[in-house]
Image (cartoon, rainbow, N blue to C red):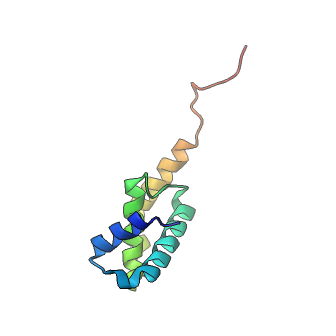
Amino acid sequence: MIMPEILQEFKERMKLGDEEDENLTRILIASNLSLMRICGDYDLSLDEEFKELVFERARYVYNDALEYFQANFLTQINDLRLAKALEEIPDEGDTNETI
């Protein structure tokens, strides 16, 4: 779900009016889902780096240049993917075992 404030922020960034809201919402949803599948489960309203990446992918889609997105943002994609993977590794000092 794309919150109205996320859509508004994207429109302001792209300098777009209200006439394309439905199309932009579809683009943002697809971009969010695609990047969550690649990078992990991030929340657009809480993670500015992930939101930035979603906006960039949506910009590429809007401008019919999606084929260039992954190559141009591979470092950022990998950074988010790695950060999410590291979050999921249990801390070695965090054992709940009792001896």
**Left or right position of 35 against 10:** right
The residue drawn where x is 29% and y is 75% is: 14
| Number of numbered discs overlaid on the protein picture | 0
Of residue 49 and residue 21, the one placed in the foreground of this image is 21
The residue drawn where x is 60% and y is 35% is: 90
Quarter of the image with the C terminus is top right
Q: Position of residue 92 (x, y in %)?
A: 58, 28
Residue 98 visible somewhere in the drawing: yes
Toward the right, the furthest residue is 99
Of residue 2 and residue 31, the one placed in the foreground of this image is 2
Residue 63 visible somewhere in the drawing: no
**Left or right position of 22 against 12:** right
Identify whether 11 is placed above or below 38: below
Q: Position of residue 94 (x, y in %)?
A: 59, 26
Toward the left, the furthest residue is 15
Q: Position of residue 98 (x, y in %)?
A: 71, 16
Identify whether 28 is placed above or below 91: below
The residue drawn where x is 52% and y is 43% is: 86
Q: Quadrant of residue 15?
A: bottom left
The residue drawn where x is 33% and y is 74% is: 11
Of residue 12 and residue 63, the one placed in the foreground of this image is 12
Identify whether 42 is placed above or below 8: above
